[in-house]
Amino acid sequence: MNIINVPVGMLGTNCYLVCDEGRCVVVDPGDNGVRVVKKIRESGCTPVAIFLTHGHFDHVLAVPEVLAYADVPVYIHKAEVAEKPSDFSYYPQGVNDLRHYGEGDELDFGGDLRFRVMHTPGHSPGSVTLVMDGVLITGDTLFCGSCGRTDFPGGSYPEILNSLGRIRDLEGDYQVLPGHEMPSTLERERRSNYYMLAAGEHPSLPGGTL
């Protein structure tokens, strides 16, 4: 398995191409669709799905360009879908195959393209974390040294603390690939991330960034 990071947009969203055996899943194509499609072509992989960790605009803007290149299913938690355009939920206009995923779902596209879904709300109601063999794609739930902000519509500080506690309690270590900024490891975050350490302790400090 090869994971290609494609930073996109003014907010530096991390789009990921999870590649294996000539196929790829495109995670959070947030902007710069031409660049994302160029990276897909360069990878030599054929897209089989688009996964959205949540519906905020900076994680979904390039979905139409990717779909124009490859008409594949788009997966998102049902709590993130809007009935009209919104910056804080996904409006799936022009999507031919919209699929909902949530807690405990397992998606297997063959080879190493196997994913388990954790529902990790807090940054948004339907935020998810994608669990692979040794890798977590955490969207805007967990960042290196921080967590996603909770003051947007649908955000909740107690919920994100609960989600961080569940991620913290996963067995073993993982590479952490967040929705913004630099990667980390779960062991590093267990040791040093204030919000992960505070999970379950109900601190009074407001949470998060981005």
Image: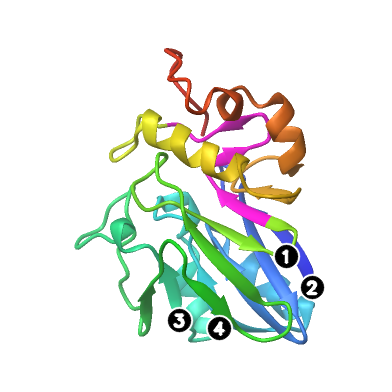
Q: Residue at x 73, y 27 (%)?
A: 191
Residue 46 versus residue 13 in the image, above or below: below
Sooner in the amino-acid sequence: mark 2 or mark 4: 2
Quadrant housing the N terminus: bottom right
User: Is 169 situated left or right of 118 in this image?
Assistant: right
Sooner in the amino-acid sequence: mark 1 or mark 4: 4
Q: Nearer the viewer, mark 3 or mark 1?
A: 1
Give, as a single range, the part of the protein colored magenta: 136-149
> Is disc 1 placed on a helix, strand or loop?
loop
Per the image, the residue denoted by label 3 is: 73
Q: Nearer the viewer, mark 2 or mark 1?
A: 1
Residue 13 versus residue 155 in the image, above or below: below
Query: Which of 54/115 is in front?
Result: 115
Q: Which labelled disc corresponds to residue 1?
A: 2
User: Is 179 situated left or right of 62 in this image?
Assistant: right
Inter-mark Cα distance, 2 to 4: 22 Å
Inter-mark Cα distance, 1 to 4: 28 Å
Inter-mark Cα distance, 2 to 3: 21 Å
Q: Which labelled disc corresponds to residue 133?
A: 1
Question: Residue 25's spot in the image, x, y percent?
Answer: 61, 74
Question: Residue 206's spot in the image, x, y percent?
Answer: 43, 18
Q: Are marks 2 and 1 in contact (CB under 8 Å)?
A: yes
Per the image, the residue denoted by label 4 is: 69
Q: Tag 4: residue type?
A: Tyr
Sooner in the amino-acid sequence: mark 2 or mark 1: 2
